Image: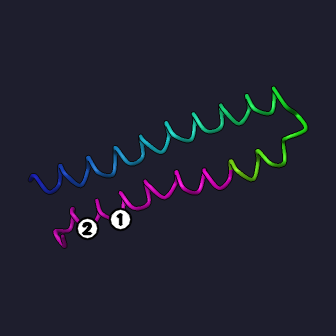
Amino acid sequence: MTTILAGAIMIGLGALAAGIGDSILFARYMEGIARQPEARGTLFGQTMILFGLIEALPIISIAFGILVLFGIV
């Protein structure tokens, strides 16, 4: 019973954290474009790198959550 709860918490919090991180990242990206439109290309590249790093968290947490749910770990 506790492994199901632990797996569900890992998966849920990983998705929640990614959603919050993505929303903050893209809000700052839009704010940066509004302040300096000429820096759009540089900001876009940096934003996509950070987006990939933020999205690594839920992928790892889902993988570990599934391992915990099935009792492998």
Residue type at mark 1? Ala
Residue neighbourhood size for the residue with mark 2, other residues' Cα within 10 Å, grouped as few (<14), some (14–19), many (≥20): some
Residue that protrudes farthest toward the bottom in the picture: 72
Q: Is residue 57 magenta?
A: yes
* Residue pointed to by mark 1: 63
What residue appears at the point 68 percent right and 53 percent down from the top-left corner? 48
The kind of secondary structure element at disc 2 is helix
Magenta region: which residues?
48-73
* Mark 2 and mark 1 residues within 8 Å of each other at the beta carbon: yes
Q: Is residue 26 magenta?
A: no
What residue appears at the point 10 percent right and 52 percent down from the top-left corner? 2
Residue neighbourhood size for the residue with mark 1, other residues' Cα within 10 Å, grouped as few (<14), some (14–19), many (≥20): some
- Is 36 located above or below residue 41 in the figure? above
* Residue pointed to by mark 2: 67
Residue 58 in the image: x percent, y percent? 43, 54
The kind of secondary structure element at disc 1 is helix
Residue 12 in the image: x percent, y percent? 34, 45
Residue type at mark 2? Leu
